[in-house]
Amino acid sequence: MKKDKEKTEVLEKIANGITWWVGSIPSLIVHTLFFITSFLLPMLNLVEFDKMLLILTTVVSLEAIYLAIFIQMSVNKSHEKIEDIQEDIEEISEDIEDIQEDIEEISEDIEEISEDIEEINEDIEDIQEDIEEINEDEDDEDHNERAKNVILKSNVNSNKNEIKALKDIISQLQNEIDQLKK
């Protein structure tokens, strides 16, 4: 089986080489010289005109038959390569569609996370307002209570900073998604 394939590949290389050579300038020169020589032989009385014409016609006919076969082999090989390329293009198109769907899903997730962060920010602002109201209402609180409030405010501010950092990350992800879509 391997030897058959190797033989086929060798024959295809030979066919490609012959097809290339026939379509080249050197081939044109060789054929022109051959035809000139063929017609000169009867003029120089080296060969009879009828015999030269018979041999020339036979040689040209055989050459045409083999050239047609070699050219068809090249066309068949080119057709196979084109089909392979078309299959590759279809696979790539499917992969691109999958990536686009993934990007859309990620975009939706980021939008949901952004909405959640906005809600958390609103809750934090409400808590801060409540803390300020408590501080105003209880001016007579002892030192420990005030310390607790300061710690609570500090935690709220820390959470705000973390939420801002998350917003920045989401914004960066959104920009990257927009670039991937392009």
Image: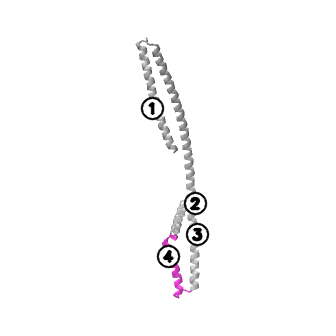
Amino acid carrying label 4: it is Val
Per the picture, the main secondary structure of the magenta-coloured stretch is helix
Q: Is residue 176 above or below residue 3?
A: above
> Which numbered disc, 4 or 2, marks the residue that appears first in the sequence?
4
Residue at the bottom extreme of this rendering: 45
The span from disc 1 to disc 4 (Cα, nearest Å) is 79 Å
Residue at the front extreme of this rendering: 136
Is label 3 or label 1 in front? Answer: 1
Out of 155 and 19, give the one closest to the viewer. 155
Where does residue 79 sit, x and y in percent of width and height?
57, 60
Assess whether mark 1 and mark 3 are in contact (beta carbons under 8 angstroms).
no
Where does residue 169 sit, x and y in percent of width and height?
46, 35
38 within the magenta span: yes
How many other residues sit within 10 Å of disc 2, few (<14), some (14-19) or many (≥20)?
few
> Which numbered disc, 4 or 3, marks the residue that appears first in the sequence?
4
Assess whether mark 2 and mark 4 are in contact (beta carbons under 8 angstroms).
no
Out of 20 and 115, give the one closest to the viewer. 115
The span from disc 4 to disc 3 (Cα, nearest Å) is 19 Å
At a point 42% along the width and 15% down the height, the residue shown is 146
Can you see residue 46? no
Circle 3 residue: 68
Amino acid carrying label 2: it is His
Residue 57 position by quadrant: bottom right
| Secondary element at image label 4 | helix
Can you see residue 179? yes
> Which numbered disc, 1 or 4, marks the residue that appears first in the sequence?
4
Colouring of the image: one colour
Amino acid carrying label 1: it is Ala
Tell me, for residue 30, which label it has, or none: 4
